[in-house]
Image (cartoon, rainbow, N blue to C red):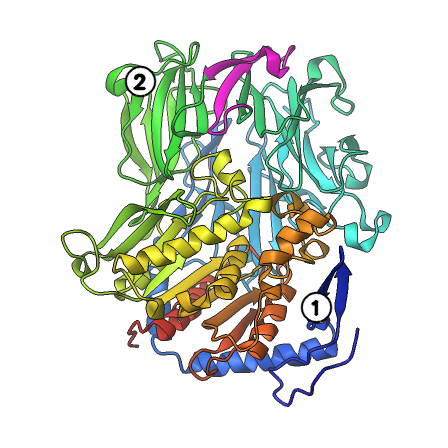
């Protein structure tokens, strides 16, 4: 491992070891390699010192109590999900205003809703989360998945919808598993799902991978489940499964890690045993993402970005599903094709297709003739949304009908469920969140700015209405948070965000940059910010910061950069490449050592997004921007807060530990004014968390940013 190059009397300052790797002929220093091992007694001691330093700093931050109270108030809307109809029952999620987690409800005909799964009732500590759920075709059984302590391991069980009794499971190793039910066959209930191979069959470093598609019969031992797909394929493959309501068709998809492409196969189960389906290729080896299903009209529907980076919907004969036989139903448009739903009830004059779109991250909905794909004329061809915001999934009845449900949210509107009646075109709220809140008077605008290479990038900016002049610019520069992500084709669309509202209400500005690497402008936009083009994402973010300064929204001394996960990499790059642009940085669950990221967490699944250090050219990309390797001694770095979660099984906290140690050693800033701190949480992971955990994290990150940027917060 090496020996320390100098003693370190301050327990927060980590010893630097003489560790140097030769990678493709490049000497790569890694003085904090030892911090990769969370169990090393030196790491334990260093982490304890970081905990104590953060607690001392946090205790002196003004406004923490006020922020937590306000965030809790803004989160007290609760939440409600769209209804899922199966048989005579309706299923949905709901979180009460004072609840830590949402619950899964079922409503029987003529009865009040009742709780089927309540994570807090199962675990009063609040560290168990409901990851996914899916009722069977008849609405009698529900497969659901729970994780403990932030692990996202998704242990699968099945319950009886009538009694709430667990009738099957637990089935472990079901992380990220979809569930596709077959119709009831006498007393036999079965579904397809995805599970990792048993750990004893694999090397330790591969135990998070090697997924397979299985057929499980309810009530039988999972160890006897029949493997139906996946053997011999990439160990980092993720699989999707779908079955038609009548049980005739099975669709399996496979994507290698998070690569923006997948393969699709279809099997006609009427002509084969469900335990040994005979698959036919829909699409394989094409550089595109594709989804497929068979409609109630017997056509194969293909949702794809093949030769259409903004998406198109095609149809084909499921018996002849090859791309050469596809016919466009909804061709590529200027907007991004997001979602579709079929309405084909007997009450309608003709079957309809409802299409969800986004343009510059803002949603719209249109109505088309299902047979031809032609949009209906006039007002009948558009569903008028309640504002400029974002919609959730379009949900109809599985047996068909004339009704549609979807969620809608915008900057000041928590998500409501809306109901669309295709007979009349009427749109109305079907379910509002159960709690009411007083939302502050804010104004949001979508602005455009040029990046370093002239590319136009869009920026969502929100501020308190009374602090803006007639042109929508603050009357004086204000403390500002700039948030970004820029990766994996993920779009940042307008939505109700209690953290942003709390910041803006206190007098700050909140800006969200729709950077390259995201999905806001389609797959081309995503690919313009991945692999060897990743630096363009960082340049977009730096340009957003300069734009906010040039337009008078803020100053470098009042600007705080925030990001998590891939967004943590983004702000890690920002603070090491442009430290003078920011007063503070909040870097959450980040990737930061890009030379070794593939060796930890789920890093091996992300090589198509970033590149791999095993290839000389791609190592060059990674090493050039890797924040851990860009630290320069004697640089005046901004205030930095790393937030990490010990249960994070996606992005290992070692990334934050290593860069935190490197910055504490290198910065020339006064640590009493611009500290480098690490906030650590136990029993929570990368994703879902309880309300109180969320409020506590928001409280601390906003209070940290407020102190660094000069935003006044009084308790």
The spot of residue 618 in percent (x, y) is 67, 48
The spot of residue 158 in percent (x, y) is 64, 41
Residue picked out by circle 2: 423
Q: Secondary structure at mark 1?
A: strand
What stretch of residues is rendered in magenta? 307-329
Would residue 527 appear left or right of 379 to someone viewing this image?
Answer: right
Question: Is 308 colored magenta in this rendering?
Answer: yes
Q: Identify the residue at the far right of this view.
A: 201
Q: Is residue 658 shown above or below 439?
A: below
Residue picked out by circle 1: 29
Label annotation for residue 609: none
Q: Quadrant of the N terminus?
A: bottom right
Instruction: Say whether residue 512 is visible.
Output: yes
Tell me what residue is drawn at x 18 percent, y 62 percent.
Answer: 475
Q: Quadrant of the C terminus?
A: bottom left
**Quadrant housing residue 19:** bottom right
**Quadrant housing residue 505:** bottom left
Q: Nearer the viewer, residue 337 or 19?
A: 19
Question: Is 198 colored magenta in this rendering?
Answer: no
């Amino acid at each position: 491992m090496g020996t320390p190059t100098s003693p370190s009397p301050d327990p927060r300052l980590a010893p630097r070891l003489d560790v140097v790797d030769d990678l493709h002929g490049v000497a790569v220093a890694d003085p904090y390699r030892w911090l990769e091992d969370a169990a090393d007694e030196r790491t334990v001691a260093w982490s304890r010192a970081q905990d104590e330093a953060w607690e001392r700093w946090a205790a002196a931050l003004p406004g923490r109590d006020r922020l937590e109270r306000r965030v809790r108030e803004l989160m007290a809307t609760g939440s409600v999900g769209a209804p899922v109809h199966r048989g005579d029952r309706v299923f949905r999620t709901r979180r009460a205003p004072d609840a830590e987690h949402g619950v899964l409800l079922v409503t029987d005909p003529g009865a009040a809703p009742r709780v089927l799964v309540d994570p807090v009732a199962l675990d009063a500590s609040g560290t168990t989360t409901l990851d996914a759920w899916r009722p069977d075709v008849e609405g009698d059984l529900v497969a659901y998945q729970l994780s403990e302590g932030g692990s996202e391991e998704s242990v699968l069980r099945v319950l009886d919808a009538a009694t709430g009794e667990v009738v099957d499971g637990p089935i472990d190793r079901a992380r990220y598993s979809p569930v596709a039910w077959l119709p009831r066959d006498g007393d036999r209930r079965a579904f397809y799902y995805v599970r990792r191979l048993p750990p004893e069959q694999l090397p330790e470093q591969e135990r998070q991978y090697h997924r397979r598609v299985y057929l499980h019969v309810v009530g039988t031992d999972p160890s006897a489940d029949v493997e139906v797909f996946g053997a011999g394929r990439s160990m980092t493959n993720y699989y999707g499964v779908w079955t038609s309501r009548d049980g005739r068709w099975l669709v399996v998809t496979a994507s290698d890690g998070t690569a923006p492409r997948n393969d699709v196969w279809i099997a006609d189960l009427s002509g084969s045993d469900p335990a040994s389906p005979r698959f036919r290729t829909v699409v394989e080896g094409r550089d595109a993402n594709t989804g497929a299903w068979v409609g109630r009209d017997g056509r194969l529907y293909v949702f794809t970005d093949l030769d259409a980076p903004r998406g198109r919907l095609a149809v084909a004969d499921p018996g002849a599903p090859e791309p050469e036989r596809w016919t466009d139903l909804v061709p590529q448009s200027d907007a991004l094709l997001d979602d579709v739903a079929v309405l084909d009830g007997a009450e309608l004059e003709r079957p309809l297709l409802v299409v969800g779109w986004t343009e510059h991250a803002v949603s719209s909905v249109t109505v088309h003739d299902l047979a031809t794909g032609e949009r209906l004329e006039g007002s009948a061809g558009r569903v008028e949304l309640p504002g400029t915001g974002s919609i959730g999934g379009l949900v109809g009845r599985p047996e068909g009908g004339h009704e549609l449900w979807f969620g809608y949210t915008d900057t000041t509107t928590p998500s409501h469920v809306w109901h669309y009646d295709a007979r009349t075109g009427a749109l109305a709220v079907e379910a509002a969140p159960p709690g009411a809140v007083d939302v502050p008077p804010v104004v949001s605008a979508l602005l455009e700015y040029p990046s370093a290479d002239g590319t136009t990038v869009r920026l969502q900016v929100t501020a308190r209405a009374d602090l803006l002049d007639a042109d929508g610019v603050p009357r004086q520069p204000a403390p500002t948070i700039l948030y970004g992500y820029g990766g994996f084709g993920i779009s940042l669309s307008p939505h109700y965000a209690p953290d942003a509202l709390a910041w803006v209400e206190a007098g700050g500005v909140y800006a969200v940059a729709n950077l390259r690497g995201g999905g806001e402008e389609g797959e081309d936009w995503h690919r313009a910010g991945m692999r060897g083009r990743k630096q363009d994402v960082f340049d977009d973010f730096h340009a957003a910061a300069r734009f906010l300064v040039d337009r008078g929204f803020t100053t470098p001394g009042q600007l705080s950069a925030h990001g998590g996960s891939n967004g943590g990499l983004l702000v890690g790059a920002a603070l090491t490449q442009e430290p003078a642009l920011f007063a503070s940085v909040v870097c959450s669950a980040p990737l930061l050592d890009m030379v070794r990221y593939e060796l930890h967490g789920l890093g091996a699944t992300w090589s198509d997004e970033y590149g791999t250090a095993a290839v000389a050219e791609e190592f060059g990309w990674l090493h050039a921007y890797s924040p851990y390797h860009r630290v320069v001694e004697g640089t005046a770095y901004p205030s930095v807060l790393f937030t990490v979660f010990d249960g994070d099984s996606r992005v290992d906290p070692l990334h934050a530990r290593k860069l935190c140690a490197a910055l504490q050693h290198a910065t020339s800033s006064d640590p009493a004014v611009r500290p480098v701190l690490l906030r650590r949480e136990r029993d929570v992971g990368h994703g879902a968390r309880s309300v109180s955990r969320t409020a506590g994290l928001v409280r601390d990150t906003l209070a940290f940013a407020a102190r660094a940027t000069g935003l006044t917060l009084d308790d």
